Image: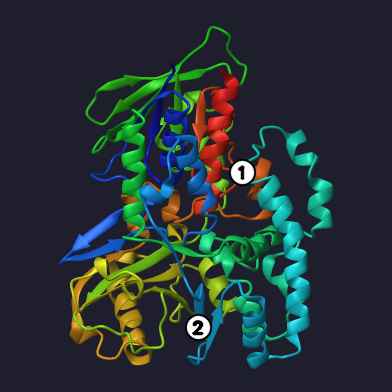
Amino acid sequence: MKKIIIIGSGFGGLGAAARLAAAGYEVEIFEKRDKLGGRAYVYEKNGFTFDGGPTIITAPFLFDEIWQQAGKRREDYIEFVPCEPFYRIFDHNGRHFDYNDDEAFILSEIDKRNPEDKRGYLNFLHTTKAIFDKGFVELSDTPFLSLWDMLKIVPDLLRLQSYKSVYRYVSGFIQDDFLRQVFTFHPLLVGGNPFDTTSIYALIHYLEREWGVWYAKGGTGALVNAFGRLIKELGGAVRLNAEVDEILVEERTVTGQRGKNRVRGVRLKDGSVHEADVIISNAEVAYTYKHMIPARYRRKYTDRRLERIRYAMSLFVIYFGTKKRYLDSKLKHHNIILGPRYRGLLKDIFHNNGELANDFSLYLHMPTITDTSLAPEGHEAFYVLSPVPNLKSGIDWNRARKPYRDAIMQFLEQNYLPDLQENLVAEHVIDPLHFRDTLNSFQGSAFSVEPILTQSAWFRPHNRSEEFGNLYFVGAGTHPGAGLPGVLSSSKIAENLIVTAG
């Protein structure tokens, strides 16, 4: 029985651990923090439970597959609750558009804005099915380990117009400016700029229509705990407060040939050594190579190459709880609040000049509408998220943090949550420094490698390391990319590659 060490416990690592433990491997997770979850870490403060990470569940069958492989039912561990609407999207004047999987309802919402776009939406929806069938159904759990793997799909990429950005693609069908924003914001959920990200990511719209948008009862942390319980029942081991300092390399006698070296284990910060036949890193790919593997062993992923990669945006997040409930507000569970600028703001975030924009667009999460267990009785729990530049921008967040926090909270109080600040009883803030220093994300990116066409599929860091034959990657930085469907698919790829390798 092969021993597998998994570095990190985000959903990519948890998915891989459960799959491989169910397949009969000896699995051990090493997590640097005091809880499982990675970006899905849970913050508990003054009786509130705040989910640190992904709160939008799509493609729930990917979770069900893992439990079925273990001979169990996911429903016995965690309940998924449908969200209706999926999102409420506000324009900068506060007028909203509700978004779900009901075609007639969506058309009625479009009709309120621009009736002429109803036919264009139907045409857009029809074309996204073909993109979905190719990009998700066929390729999301297929590894791209050779250039030939990529060349085989080039005709399909051209046919599906993947050379266009999501925004350009949608604009070919939708004319109203706000509706273009409604149907192009999805790449932001995986760290992409709609004006740069390949139109393949338009499949997210169809994916949500196909399987819905769900909430894990008890919060995302309850889903992490369900994974932890499953992994332990399958015989897997978990080590918390166990930070990996180095991946140990076994040099082979044949030198000068890529792939001949192998990894043999890890050394923790405390100096202890743990050996394994296979290592899976759910740590950020750039951090893994740059900080865990000495430069002399890296032929392809040199420090210089890692720094040339384009990394996704970061996030500024305020978790807060109030002693007042806001059930009479116009808010829903998932709210997207778009600012007065769209293209200009995204340019500031992704192609910034070192300054933080004065305006913002926000995702406001209000889970206690669905699940009151996350707050004390009579209280409300929220988090508000603003996309911001990563640390390559040079923004000094020690100086920018408080003014930016104050601007967001004042905006929410004036427009959505009356008397917010006098009712605050809990608050926690994270910024790009947290992503760099706590989550070990290169340049403080919240989503790792930016999902542009030239950094997708074969062009993305591979699921099996090009440097070492028994080192694998799962998570946002490898194929297929960020988001729960992406990282769970990466765990499926890793399992298949390991099992096939014997």
Q: Amino acid at mark 2?
A: Gly
Identity of the residue furthest to the left in this view: 46
Residue 339 is tagged as 2
The percent coordinates of residue 229 (x first, y second) are: 31, 40
Judge left or right: residue 373 versus residue 140. Answer: left
Q: Which quadrant is home to the C terminus? A: top right
Sort mark 2 into few (<14), some (14-19) or many (20+) by Cα contacts within 10 Å: some
Q: Which quadrant is home to the N terminus? A: top left
Tell me: residue 283, above or below residue 50. Answer: above
Residue at 55% x, 64% y: name it: 212
The percent coordinates of residue 328 (x first, y second) are: 34, 89
Q: Amino acid at mark 1?
A: Arg
Label 1 belongs to which residue?
A: 460
Between 170 and 21, the one nearer to me in the picture = 21
Between 364 and 450, the one nearer to me in the picture = 364
Residue at 54% x, 81% y: name it: 98
